[in-house]
Image (cartoon, helix red, strand yellow):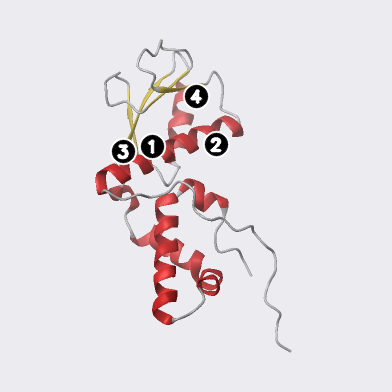
Amino acid sequence: MYSWHSEVVSTEYPIVAQFTHAVLERRAEALNDDVNHLRDALYMEFFSTFIQVLNIRQLLAPVKILISFTGLSALKKYVMDRINGVGGVLVEFTDDYDADIDFVISDTSLGNPTAIETFVWHTIPNEDEWQRFIKHAVSRSVLKFNVTYGHTIQQEVPVCTMTDESPAEEA
């Protein structure tokens, strides 16, 4: 049997992950069934469906990123493309510094006097740097979601380990 909840789901899509978790809890209660049984059987199916049918990007407030690379246009394009591939975050890129900036990504320190989270990358970010950015971007997205809709989506959603076990085949 496959895991009902992978770490990628919880870290990159915490809003949809928690929504799926809540739907299955309510479904289990309505059916008088064990929630763990429903999660094992339906979690990834429900989660995938929600990703497909809910326009997540319309639900999310944009995370505004000032991106500035001096003479490294290929690195800038690579970083922008990769950030746009993060499904749990709606991103708005800007070249202008203003009060609404959530993050700065640059190849040089911009003398950030307002303590805006800054990522300085001179080369393609390694996996640790990338995961650190994703964690911060998703966290900011969740914060904006909570403020916009008055909800309290938690960053930490229960995570089960992946298993390769499959149900025993009947003879």
Q: Is residue 48 left or right of residue 123?
A: left
Type of residue at label 2? Gln
Q: Who comes first in sequence, dot 2 or dot 1?
A: 2
Q: Which mark is residue 131?
A: 2
Quadrant, the N terminus: bottom right
Q: Which mark is residue 75?
A: 4
Helix, strand or loop at disc 1?
helix
Type of residue at label 3? Pro
Q: How many marks?
A: 4
Marks 4 and 2 sit apart, C-alpha to C-alpha, by 17 Å
Few, some or many residues within 10 Å of mark 3 (<14, 14–19, 20+): some
Marks 2 and 3 sit apart, C-alpha to C-alpha, by 19 Å
Marks 4 and 1 sit apart, C-alpha to C-alpha, by 24 Å
Marks 2 and 1: which is nearer the front? 1
Residue under label 3, please give it.
Answer: 62
Helix, strand or loop at disc 2?
helix
Whether pointer 2 and pointer 3 mark residues with C-beta atoms closer than 8 Å, the reply is no
Helix, strand or loop at disc 4?
helix
Image position, residue 68 (x, y; %): 40, 19
Q: Nearer the viewer, residue 19 or 88?
A: 19
Image position, residue 141 (x, y; %): 37, 40
Q: Quadrant of residue 101?
A: top left
Image position, residue 88 (x, y; %): 42, 46
Q: Is residue 86 left or right of residue 165?
A: left
Marks 2 and 1 sit apart, C-alpha to C-alpha, by 14 Å
Residue under label 1, please give it.
Answer: 140
8 to 122, vertically: above or below? below
Marks 4 and 3 sit apart, C-alpha to C-alpha, by 22 Å
Type of residue at label 1? Arg
Which residue appears at 43% of the width and 36% of the height?
137
